Amino acid sequence: MSSQLNVDTIVDKAGSGGTNVKVGNTSTYVSDGGSSTQNLVQGLTKQWVSFDGTAATVTADDSFNTASLTDNGTGNFSANFTNAMANANFFSCGDANARRIVNSEGRTTARHNIRVYEDSSSSDRSGSRGAAIGDLA
C-alpha cells in the first residue's frame, strides 16, 4: 500500500524554518507530461563554471562544484572539481558567446578541459562557460 504526504512547508527538526532534504540515488520525478519518470540525481548538473578567459588571472565569475580554474594556454582551460566524479565518462559542454568550444579531451574524475576556438584557432574569450553531468564519486 502506498502512502501520500501532503504538506505546504517542510522545516528542520529544530523548527527554525530551514530545510535539509536528502534525496537518494533511487529517487525519481514524473515528467512534465506525466507519462514517464526519470532518475532525479542522474539529471542534475554536477559542475558548472562561468569565467572571463581574457583576464590576466582566470577566476570564476560564478560556479558550482568548481574548486579552481587552470589556464593551460590560449583558449585552453581546466575546470577543477571540488567533488570528484565517479569516473571520466561524464558529459561535458560549454559555450563562449556563440563560439565553438570543444572540451571532450583531458577529462579525469577531478576536472575537464574547456577548449575555446574562434575561426579554428584557440582563443581566449570573455563569457566562457563549461558544465559536467554524470555520476559523482
Image (cartoon, rainbow, N blue to C red):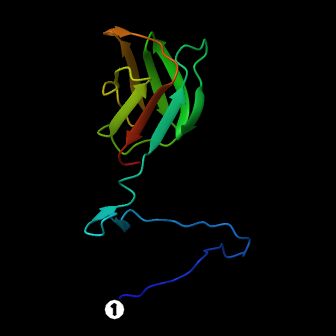
Q: Is residue 109 visible?
A: yes
Query: Looking at the rendering, in which quadrant would you find the N terminus?
Result: bottom left
Crowding at dot 1, Cα within 10 Å, few <14 / some 14-19 / many 20+, comes out as few
Q: Position of residue 125 (x, y in %)?
A: 48, 16
Residue at the limit of the structure toward the bottom, as seen here: 1
| Amino acid marked by disc 1 | Met
Where residue 54 appears, as percent x and y from the top left, is: 54, 13
Q: Residue at x 31, y 24 (%)?
A: 105
Residue 68 placement, left or right of 18: left
Badge 1 element: loop
Q: Position of residue 122 (x, y in %)?
A: 38, 10
Q: Residue at x 45, y 24 (%)?
A: 78
Numbered-mark total = 1
The percent position of residue 43, horizontal first and vertical second, equals: 36, 53
Judging depth in this view, the residue of 36 and 109 nearest the camera is 36
Residue to which mark 1 is pinned: 1
Quarter of the view holding residue 94? top left
Figure quadrant of residue 92 = top left
Query: Which residue is found at the position 40% from the left and 39% from the top?
Result: 132
Q: Would residue 36 be found to the left or right of residue 29 on screen?
A: left
